[in-house]
Amino acid sequence: MRVFYDHQVTSLQDAGGVSRYYFELVRALLRTGDVNADLLFGFTRSVLPFTKLRPDARVNNWPSLLRPGYARYGVNEALTAVLAPFRGRFDVYHAGYQRVLPYIRSSAVVVTHHDSTPQRFPHLFRDAAAIHKRLRKVYERADRIICISESCRTDLLEYFAIEPERTEVIYHGFTPLPEDDGEWPDELSPERPYLLFVGARHSYKNLPTVLRALALQKDSELRLVVAGGGPFSSEETQLIEQLQLNERVRLIPRVSDAVLSAAYRNALMFIYPSIYEGFGFPPLEAMHAGCPAVVSGSSALPEVCGDAAFYFDPSSVEELAALIAKLRDDDRLRLSKREAGRAQVMKYSWERSAAQTLKVYRKAIESLS
């Protein structure tokens, strides 16, 4: 089965859950022996080793000086328009993001619905209406739609006129981070206890709530380490200064998987305050590392994390601050979910996800006959 994957995600991000999803999914699909994968990504700076999928997959993925965003997207869009027609015809085109590119010749189109954040919180996006319009066209065109959680599918059916029989829930798998016992940055020293925030910091990721909760802590030695997501914005820097947290907040703007693993293992607890997620990798990474996960009780997160996390209302600074203080002072409580966390992680397998995705590809092809 010939399957095509486009550049959209790797053009818009160098790291993140959606990029990891496509990397791990393709890698697992290749292990089935039933998929001949073609990845035309163009110029990227992805932290994920897509080129290592060769020779089992055809991968065009070259280093780029351009930062992730629409400039890089435009370059790769033009490149795709030139090269894609010469790739031949595909059995399935698994579209990467908010568009089905018109240059790809395929029998069936499959898309993955990752979340409905622009629909639920349009005030957080400058172009929420435009995003919705693009997605509506994508879902109208798709022969099958993969949803990454039941919560994700419920939202899809609420906001789009989709026939339920065209949808399928397929959970992500989980990939353990490398346990590198080498040196780590001084910010990650376990000698000084710290809270950990990981990843992108878009508005709905809700970092300000963590900062305000930290400012309410009586323990002035407690720090916050922010790992990944690039440099602080001017608004984030201003808030840190207003809360007088300059000496208590440390940023590691870009982290390798090995450093991220050390960050989880050395943290007092991991905070995931996102107001909306379609799935959510970081809590599982924290659980696998034995790090207590303090997670927003919203969207798909309770579904994904089960009984293995501590939950709070992401709209309440006071509730998060009280939970941090409670866990900080109670070692037994903080570590009480460690075994449950590791058991929860075991529920998610890329092999299972790939097998289910392959079935969806076949259903998409069969629906056209």
Image (tube, rainbow, N blue to C red):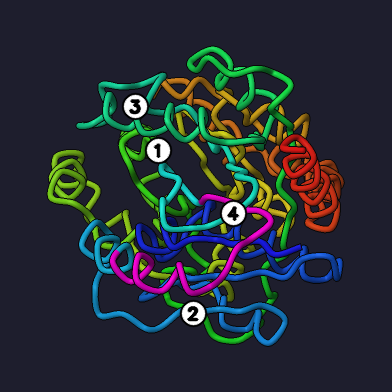
Which residue was labeled with disc 3? 133
Which residue was labeled with disc 4? 106
| Marks 2 and 3 close (CB-CB < 8 Å) | no
Q: Residue at x 32, y 55 (%)?
A: 249
Crowd rating for badge 3 (residues with CA inside 10 Å; few <14, some 14–19, many 20+)? few
Q: Quadrant of residue 134?
A: top left
Q: Please name which of the two marks, 4 or 2, marks the residue nearer to the observer.
A: 4
Q: Using the image, determine if residue 357 lies above or below residue 82.
A: above
Residue 44 visible from this viewpoint: no
- The first of marks 2 and 3 along the sequence is 2
Q: Using the image, determine if residue 145 lies above or below residue 31.
A: above
Q: Amino acid at mark 2?
A: Asn
| Marks 1 and 2 close (CB-CB < 8 Å) | no
Q: Please name which of the two marks, 3 or 1, marks the residue nearer to the observer.
A: 3
| Marks 3 and 1 close (CB-CB < 8 Å) | no
- Image quadrant for the C terminus? top right
| Marks 3 and 4 close (CB-CB < 8 Å) | no
Q: Is residue 94 magenta?
A: yes
- The first of marks 3 and 4 along the sequence is 4
Rendering coords of residue 56 (x, y %)? 72, 81
Rendering coords of residue 8 (x, y %)? 41, 56
Q: How many marks?
A: 4
Which residue was labeled with disc 1? 205
Q: Amino acid at mark 1?
A: Lys
Q: Amino acid at mark 3?
A: Lys
Label 2: which secondary element: strand
Residue 57 visible from this viewpoint: yes
Residue 60 marker? 2
